[in-house]
Image: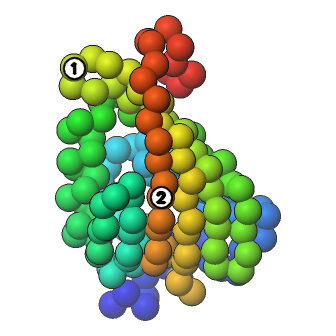
């Protein structure tokens, strides 16, 4: 049952636990393991990722599998922007290479809302991409 699942740390967040939650998310996403990542979300999680609307863990897994078929050599860095009780704002950037070999840096912001068990129930991401030269990569 979902109400028995927990993903520490739990809200309400302190600065220390908010920073920890962001680092755990960054580590999970950099693993590029859709199943592992999906466990941080409620079974009925709601996402907006760019212009795509995703509902539930199964759709999260499918979305992430598609994402990393197109976004190769992915490396992400997240930073806490602010938090209150069970919500966080995070800014991020990541780099990837598309299937033609072009490198990209994506910049964005996410708004997160967690349930009482520390599972993310809502994730709204706004993302913009910038073509870069390989020599200009920040993340190796």
Residue 29 percent coordinates (x, y): 43, 48
* Residue 117 coordinates in the image, percent (x, y): 53, 83
In this rendering, is residue 13 above or below 60? below
State the quadrant of the N terminus: bottom left
Image location of residue 4, percent across then percent down: 43, 88
Q: Is residue 38 above or below residue 68?
A: below
Q: Residue at x 29, y 74 (%)?
A: 55
Q: Answer few, some or many: residues within 10 Å of disc 2's Cα (few below 14, many 20 plus, some between 14 and 19).
A: many
- 87 and 15: which one is in front? 87
Residue 109, numbered circle: none
Judge whether 87 appears above or below 135 on screen: below
Q: Dot 1, how many residues are within 10 Å of its Cα: few (below 14), some (14-19), or many (20+)? A: few
Q: Secondary structure at mark 1?
A: loop
Q: Position of residue 119 (x, y in %)?
A: 48, 75
Judged left or right of residue 86, residue 5 is left
Q: What is the residue that sits farthest to the right in this orientation?
A: 15
Q: Quadrant of residue 129?
A: top left
Compute the Cα span from label 1 to label 2. 25 Å
Look at mark 1 in the image and give the residue it sits on.
Answer: 100
| Outermost residue toward the top in this view | 135
Q: Nearer the N terminus, badge 1 or badge 2?
A: 1
Q: Is residue 122 left or right of residue 81?
A: left
Q: Where, by quadrant of the figure, is residue 84 drawn?
A: bottom right
**Secondary structure found at label 2:** strand
Question: Where on the picture, by quarter, is residue 74?
Answer: top left
Q: Would you say 82 lies left or right of 89 here?
A: right
Which of the colour schemes (rainbow, by chain, secondary structure, one colour) is used? rainbow
Residue 4 is at least partly visible in this image: yes
Residue at point 57%, 86% (across, down):
116
Q: Which residue is mark 2?
A: 125
């Amino acid at each position: 049952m979902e109400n028995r699942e927990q993903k520490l740390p739990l809200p309400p967040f302190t600065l220390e636990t908010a920073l920890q939650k962001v680092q755990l998310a960054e580590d999970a996403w950099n693993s590029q393991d859709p199943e592992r990542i999906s466990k941080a979300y409620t079974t009925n999680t709601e996402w907006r990722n760019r212009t795509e609307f995703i509902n539930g863990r199964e759709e999260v897994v499918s979305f992430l599998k598609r994402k990393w078929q197109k976004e190769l050599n992915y490396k992400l860095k997240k930073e806490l922007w602010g938090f209150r009780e069970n919500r966080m704002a995070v800014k991020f950037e990541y780099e990837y290479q598309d299937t033609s070999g072009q490198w990209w840096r994506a910049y964005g912001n996410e708004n997160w809302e967690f349930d009482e068990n520390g599972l993310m129930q809502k994730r709204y991401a706004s993302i913009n991409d910038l073509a870069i030269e390989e020599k200009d990569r920040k993340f190796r």
